[in-house]
Image (cartoon, grey):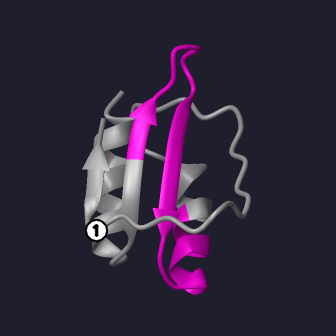
Amino acid sequence: MFYRATTRDKAVALGLDGRVRNLPDGRVEVIVSGPADRVNRLCGWLWQGSSMARVDEVICEDGPETHYVGFETR
């Protein structure tokens, strides 16, 4: 619960750009860009998430460069 909102808040606090959204199969997709050390901090935080979240798996991988400005929740 509130996983997307708290992910957005954490990403914004870290100065990252990107988006977070629910996928049709119930997973949550986070696409983020910014300095590697901050992206790594967010990847670590994703295992915790919000206090009501149940996190079973986190996969962090490099992808194509994104050009987001700010951080949006879908």
Q: Residue at x 70, y 56 (%)?
A: 60
Q: x and y percent of residue 55 in the render?
A: 60, 35
Task: Name the side, left or right, on which 63 lies relative to 30.
Answer: right
Tag 1: Cα neighbours inside 10 Å, few (<14), some, or many (≥20)?
A: few
- Return the residue found at the far top: 25
Q: Position of residue 66 (x, y in %)?
A: 50, 64
Under circle 1, the secondary element is: loop
Q: Is residue 50 visible?
A: no
Q: Is residue 8 magenta?
A: no
Q: Image height check: is 40 above or below 57?
A: below
Q: Check the image and report above or below for 70 versus 48.
A: below
**Residue plotted at (29% across, 72% down):** 13
Residue 39 in which image quadrant: bottom right
Query: Mark 1 = which residue?
Result: 69
Segment colored magenta: 20-42
- For the N terminus, the image quarter is top left
Q: Is residue 63 visible?
A: yes
How far across and down, in percent of the image, does residue 48 sit? Answer: 54, 49
Residue type at mark 1: give it: Val
Q: Foreground: 62 or 7?
A: 62
> Which residue appears at 29% of the width and 59% of the height?
71
